[in-house]
Amino acid sequence: MIKILFVCLGNICRSPMAEFIMKDMVEKRGVADRFYIASAGTSDEEIWNGVGNPVYPPAREELARHGITDVSGKRAVQITRSDYKKYDLIIGMETRHVHTMLRVFGGDPEGKVRRLLDYSDRPRDISDPWYTHRFESAYNDILEGCEALYDSLIQERRNL
Ligand code: 4NP
């Protein structure tokens, strides 16, 4: 079993999209039981009195356009230091998420922390649709990253 945590800033747009795109991918490829997939944010902006906000409606609608409909149980959570032990791969959407994670985790001695599109042929950040309103391009970027991540896991034969 490989445990993957996707990370963005608020945990209501990009990292939940990555979580549900990746869950859909492993489901369709018949390997869902080999994966534990979750998401979290570097900030607590979307958490009020300990309760996280649900997936942002435009992100939810973008997922629904691609047949991913059940995201209702997801609530925003913030990364914690103990996530480092819990997960095998911890994948940010932007370089700054990687930097924040290294601070929270106190480094990355086991090489678990990555940026999603560093798996692709065209390494880059994924812009924040919360500010750009470009949910379709965020979806496309995240799908590209998840496909490249999946391929790299297959190549490493990590529990697949
Ligand atoms: P996300 O987008 O990091 O893709 O979930 C954001 C959502 C909320 C905020 C920032 C980014 N915010 O500041 O509340």
Image (cartoon, rainbow, N blue to C red):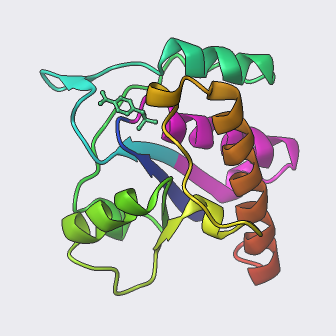
Name above or below for residue 11 compared with residue 152: above
- Residue 145: in sight, yes or no? yes
Residue in view at x 47 percent, y 18 percent = 56
| Magenta span includes 96 | no
- Residue 69: in sight, yes or no? no
Please identify the residue farthest to the left as the structure is shown: 49
Q: Can you say which quadrant of the picture contains the C terminus?
A: bottom right
Q: Is residue 62 left or right of residue 73?
A: right
Look at the image and give the residue range highlighted in magenta. 11-37
Q: Is residue 93 left or right of residue 158?
A: left
Please identify the residue farthest to the bottom as the structure is shown: 109
Residue in view at x 75 percent, y 73 percent = 152
Q: Can you say which quadrant of the picture contains the N terminus?
A: bottom right
The image position of residue 83, as x and y in percent, is 32, 60
Residue in view at x 58 percent, y 22 percent = 59
| Magenta span includes 31 | yes
Q: Is residue 35 left or right of residue 132?
A: right
Whereabouts is ligand 1, in terms of quadrant? top left
Please identify the residue farthest to the right as the structure is shown: 29
The image position of residue 71, as x and y in percent, is 57, 22
Residue closest to the eye, 137 or 93: 137
